[in-house]
Amino acid sequence: MLTDDQVEFYRERGYVLVKGLFNKDEMARHRQALHDLAHRLYVETNRGSDATWGAARDYVEGGKTSSLQHCHDVQFYDAGLARLIVDERLTGIAAQIIGPNVQLHHTKMFIKPSEKGSPFPMHQDAPFFPHENHSMIAAIVHFDDAPLEKGCVRVVPGSHKLGLLPHDSSGGWHVDPELYKVEDATPCPAEAGDVLFFSYLTIHGSGINSSPEARTTLLIQMRDPLDPPSIRTHESRGQGMMLAGVDPSCCTTKPISDDHSDNPVHKVNGTAGSCGEVTMGGEVKMGGGMAPPTMGG
């Protein structure tokens, strides 16, 4: 669980790196499972594809000749990874940030190959799947060490307070590369077992992996189940699974862009509405009233 100082750090900076959340032996087993999955996808079944962003090739040093392996919804491919995403060491911290009810949005494996693992231009995750109350957070689980030379995640501390910024959609949503350069952002070097939590409004990216070893991570995106998507987009097979707590809406929370005429009115603590309290990832208090900006604004 996060200490009070870590909670305050997250509130002010929009991210927190939790050291040693998982032990190295269990991370080594999961790392092998992910690399076995990548082999099945990219070699045995030929279903894999290079996930390098076009913007990474255009704007980040070393991006033009880089490559990246990925897979969505890894919990459907390996039972051990399914157990990992509901591990209380992970979901307990997510609940401290989001609130007691934590719902899965999606998971994604990233393997940056040795010597040429693709970078990511600086961006917020919000343009990919905007939500009304900005409760969405990410957790990046590290299965091997991620020093600077392996292209560790870099962040812009406090950028979550800027709200949703203008992004260029060409080659993957990214902010102005002249204003936000990967090399100028704060690096978050990590070891196997460390987990980086951050708001989907926090500007982040990463450099190229120039090391002789692959960098292996799992991205887990989570939200408050009462935080409606602004539009229907980026839906996935595992979306809506509860990782902690319950869904008070009984799966009736819809994207704002949808027809709501057939929605039942549910109550939260006796109050009708569709928005729950967002403790750290957004600004909405119970019943829909707006709180002073703290993180998501």
Image (tube, rainbow, N blue to C red):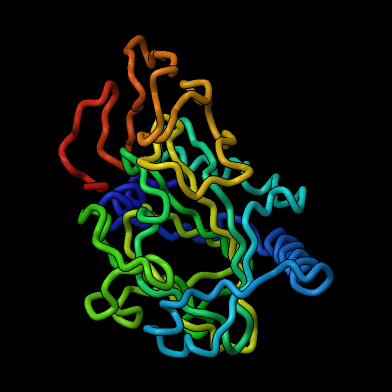
Q: In the figure, residue 65 lies in which quadrant? A: bottom right
At horizontal 59% and vertical 65% (from top left) the residue drawn is: 217
Q: In the figure, residue 275 lies in which quadrant? A: top left
At horizontal 81% and vertical 67% (from top left) the residue drawn is: 45
Task: Give percent across and percent down for residue 80.
Answer: 75, 50
Q: Is residue 273 left or right of residue 69?
A: left
Task: Give percent across and percent down for residue 191.
Answer: 55, 70
Q: Is residue 198 above or below residue 259?
A: below
Q: Nearer the viewer, residue 186 or 39?
A: 39
Q: Is residue 73 left or right of residue 260?
A: right
Q: Is residue 26 above or below residue 269?
A: below
Q: Nearer the viewer, residue 276 or 131?
A: 131
At horizontal 62% and vertical 56% (from top left) the residue drawn is: 72
Q: In the figure, residue 240 lies in which quadrant? A: top right
Q: Is residue 281 above or below residue 176?
A: above
At horizontal 43% and vertical 18% (from top left) the residue drawn is: 263
Q: How many marks?
A: 0
Q: Is residue 213 above or below residue 122?
A: below
Task: Give percent across and percent down for residue 196.
Answer: 46, 59
Q: Is residue 289 left or right of residue 43?
A: left
Which residue sits furthest left? Answer: 292
Task: Give percent across and percent down for residue 34.
Answer: 71, 64
Which residue sits furthest right? Answer: 44
